[in-house]
Image (tube, grey):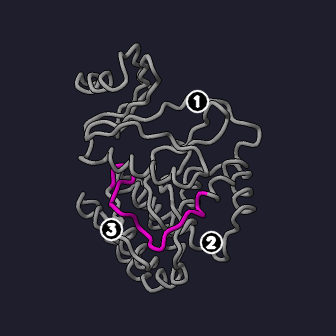
């Protein structure tokens, strides 16, 4: 149920609400389609970590700067809700994944001289540390892998063997990323099948980002975590923005970060999967 103070806020800004329709929700937020006389809006609300909706809004606004792929417009954001442009779902164009792959590559051409972001944010419900740096090897090792170990310890999750393996491989990991220097690509940060939509024109639309600037290969690795996208997506990406040699080896480590995060959030078999990945890299 939408709290009354949120409904009142929306009506003061956009006129009388004519209809509200729940469109699901999960562990992070409840979501609704809100119809007003003037427009249709998309509402995310719920009891979240303070500031989370503001950070999501900042991520969406950063992605919009690339002018490469459709991003829902941020209409309003407060501590306990986020109001976005409503995206009417559509049917994929026949060449949808080719369009998507090319657009995603173009997004990655939007760059920064530093990796990280101007603020920390969240990957799902996990805190994501984005302290700006010009040293990608140190950023990824310290603020991605080691920081995930710290989060595991805070939750009292078993991680001793994983920690030993990661630190034993520290010099190799750092060497693997030592050539990854400025400029750094703008990353969605959490792109899998549940975080893109097909809009009413049959085109891709990105949602629910965990943005930061970094190695674009990290974004591509995340897309493959749950089976991957269509081969046309990766073919079109490579044609638009070819990947450098060695990306398959680095993909293991980028996948490791997300598997570690899933273990931090959900526990279970993700731990053994993380162990397997670091051993595969070593």
> How many neighbours does mark 2 have within 10 angstroms: few (below 14), some (14-19), or many (20 or more)?
few
Q: Quick check: can you spot residue 162?
A: no
Tell me which label, 3 or 2, sits earlier in the chain. Answer: 3
In magenta, the rendered stretch is 107-126
Which residue is the site of mark 1?
89
The reply, left or right, for residue 165 in relation to residue 46 is right
Q: Position of residue 128 (x, y in %)?
A: 35, 60
The reply, left or right, for residue 195 in relation to residue 271 is right
Q: Is residue 252 above or below residue 198?
A: below
Which residue is the site of mark 2?
247
The residue sitting at 51% across, 66% down in the picture is 254
Task: State the SS at label 1.
Answer: loop
Majority secondary structure of magenta residues: loop
Q: Position of residue 198 (x, y in %)?
A: 61, 36
**Which one is in front, 154 or 205?**
205
Task: State the SS at label 2.
Answer: helix
> How many neighbours does mark 3 have within 10 angstroms: few (below 14), some (14-19), or many (20 or more)?
some
Split into 4 quadrants, where in the image is the N terminus?
top left
How far is disc 1 from disc 2 in space, using C-alphas? 34 Å
Q: Position of residue 256 (x, y in %)?
A: 47, 65
Which residue is the site of mark 3?
147
**Which one is in front, 109 or 120?**
109
How many discs mark residues in the rendered view?
A: 3
Tell me which label, 1 or 3, sits earlier in the chain. Answer: 1
Task: State the SS at label 3.
Answer: helix
């Amino acid at each position: 149920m939408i709290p009354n103070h949120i409904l009142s806020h929306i009506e003061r800004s956009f006129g009388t609400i004519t209809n509200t329709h729940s469109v699901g929700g999960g562990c992070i937020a409840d979501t609704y389609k809100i119809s007003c006389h003037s427009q249709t809006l998309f509402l995310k609300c719920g009891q979240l970590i303070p500031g989370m909706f503001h950070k999501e809004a900042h991520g969406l606004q950063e992605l919009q700067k690339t002018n490469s792929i459709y991003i829902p417009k941020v209409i309003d954001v407060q501590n306990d809700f986020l109001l976005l442009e409503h995206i009417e779902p559509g049917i994929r164009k026949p060449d949808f994944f080719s369009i998507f792959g090319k657009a995603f590559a173009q997004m990655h051409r939007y760059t920064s001289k530093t990796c990280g972001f101007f603020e920390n944010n969240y990957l799902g419900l996990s805190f994501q540390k984005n302290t700006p740096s010009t040293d990608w090897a140190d950023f990824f090792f310290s603020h991605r892998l080691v920081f995930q170990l710290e989060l595991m310890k805070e939750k009292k999750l078993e991680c001793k063997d994983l920690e030993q393996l990661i630190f034993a491989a520290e010099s190799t990991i750092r060497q693997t990323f030592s050539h990854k220097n400025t400029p750094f690509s703008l990353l969605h940060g959490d792109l899998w099948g549940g975080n893109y939509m097909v809009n009413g024109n049959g085109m891709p639309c990105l949602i629910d980002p965990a943005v930061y600037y970094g190695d674009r290969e990290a974004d591509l690795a995340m897309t493959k975590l749950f089976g991957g996208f269509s081969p046309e997506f990766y073919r079109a990406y490579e044609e638009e923005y070819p990947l450098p040699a060695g990306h398959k080896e680095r993909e293991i480590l980028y996948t490791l970060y997300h598997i570690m995060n899933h273990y931090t959030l959900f526990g279970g078999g993700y731990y053994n999967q993380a162990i397997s990945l670091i051993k595969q890299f070593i």
